Amino acid sequence: MVRLGLWLTLVALVPGAAQAQPADPYAPAAPLPTAQDPVLAERVAASLVARAQELLDQRGLLDAKQLAVEALVQSSRGSAADHARAIIHAVNLELGIAEESPRPPPVKPIEDVDTSPLQDPAQPTTPVAPPSETGRRPERLAAGVHGALYGGLVGATIGAFFDDSPARGGVPVGVALGVLGGAAMPKLADKAGLRESQIRVIGSATVWGGALGGLFADIAKTEGTSAREVLVTASITSTVAGFAGFAYARTHELTRGDVALVDTLAGLGAVGGLTLGMVIQPVESEGYSLNAVFGITAGVIVGVVAGPRTNTTPRRMLRVAGVAAIGGAAPFLLYAGIRDASSTADERITGALSTGGLVLGALLGLHWTRDLDAGLDTPEGKRRDPDDAPVALIGRSSTGRWALGGVGIAALPPALAPQHGMSLQLVGATF
């Protein structure tokens, strides 16, 4: 009986030993659990950092630092982590807390074998210079092309007065000044600090201004318009339009895609005016020039107005122009088979089909490339991410696309809630 009593006593003591011990009130608090999904963790960290920034702006330094630390616990990488570290650094500066300099990572021994080719030590190696930021390849290329075109026009105009035949003097002088303009214009653009879009605006103005001037010179005289008269008028209007384009580019923000749209529509308008003239069959040949003037003017106006409201890039408009050119050129294959010197019906039919082919080709090109380079038609240095919708269950990006987002949880500001709390964002949009 004694043994039994001792055994029962031990059994009664065992449960008592298994009871929880009292918690240490001075033990450090357990860290917040991190989300297993890295995307969700990044969104939670972004919400915490946003609230921490609000507290920092309201001079709630300690609370801001605490939320920033919790954001780093959730996600130690990405833009949210960099923002959190910046907030912690700002709070430490305000409170006079010294920060420890980060320790360099340990250097691992190199185990890979160097398989690079052996070099003769007697021959000095020339270090490869890093690419220069002043090269500005796209800007220089655009300035060189438009400088060559403008210089060639002015050179041909000057050379036309050197010989009785405008071509004999205009061609060599035009080529020489074209090369000079292509080499000098990039340097002038660099000194003026012009962006690529501004250079394209000025260049487009010189091209279409010169085209309109030459066409008006042909329209002004119904008989005997000389090449010198056309070249002089084109050079003057090209120069004036270039200065006007410079002033416009300084005060208006057009993208490379906007200028590409203007050039495409103006070119289609010029060709469409000529093909429409085949349908009209004007009594005077100057009627073709007048139609081209109307087409260029309409194309420039529509492009300038519609450009900022559309998503067009040079690559997209190049495809649109190619499809339109195919549609406008295809009917001329038919013209080779139906050509009749005794009638104008063949020209009228070809002109009507070609005009319709230009329009239809442009519409099909715009439709087929509607998703090409989406969200990239923005000014230089201001390109926005097409997926920049805020953290919310349903979000709208800056490109106008609505889509399901993620769970956007943020701390409630003190102005909305007297106690600490969290909010769930349902809908968010970026414009």
Image (cartoon, rainbow, N blue to C red):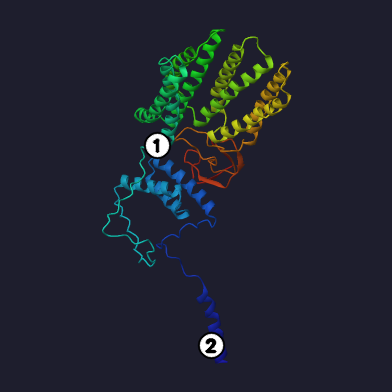
> How far from the left and from the top, in percent, is residue 390?
53, 41
Q: Write down the quadrant of residue 124 in the picture.
A: bottom left
Q: Write down the quadrant of residue 313 in the picture.
A: top right
> Which structural element holds mark 1?
loop
Residue drawn at point x = 39 percent, y = 24 percent: 177
Q: Write down the quadrant of residue 102 in the picture.
A: bottom left
Judge depth for marks 2 and 1 and give the one in front: 1
Mark 2–mark 1 Cα distance, whole angstroms, equals 93 Å
Position of residue 100 in the picture relative to residue 427 (left or right): left
Few, some or many residues within 10 Å of mark 2 (<14, 14–19, 20+): few
> Which structural element holds mark 2?
helix
Judging depth in this view, the residue of 430 and 35 nearest the camera is 430
> How far from the left and from the top, in percent, is residue 418?
49, 42
Judging depth in this view, the residue of 57 and 72 nearest the camera is 72
Q: Quadrant of the C terminus?
A: top right
Q: Could you tell me the amino acid type at mark 1?
A: Arg
Q: Disc 2 or 1, which lies upstream in sequence?
A: 2
Is residue 267 at least partly visible in the picture? yes
Numbered tag placed on residue 6 in the rendering: 2
> How far from the left and from the top, in percent, is residue 266?
56, 23
Q: Do labels 2 and 1 touch, CB within 8 Å? A: no
Numbered tag placed on residue 136 in the rendering: 1
Q: Quadrant of the N terminus?
A: bottom right
Position of residue 99 in the picture relative to residue 335 (left or right): left
Numbered tag placed on residue 94 in the rendering: none
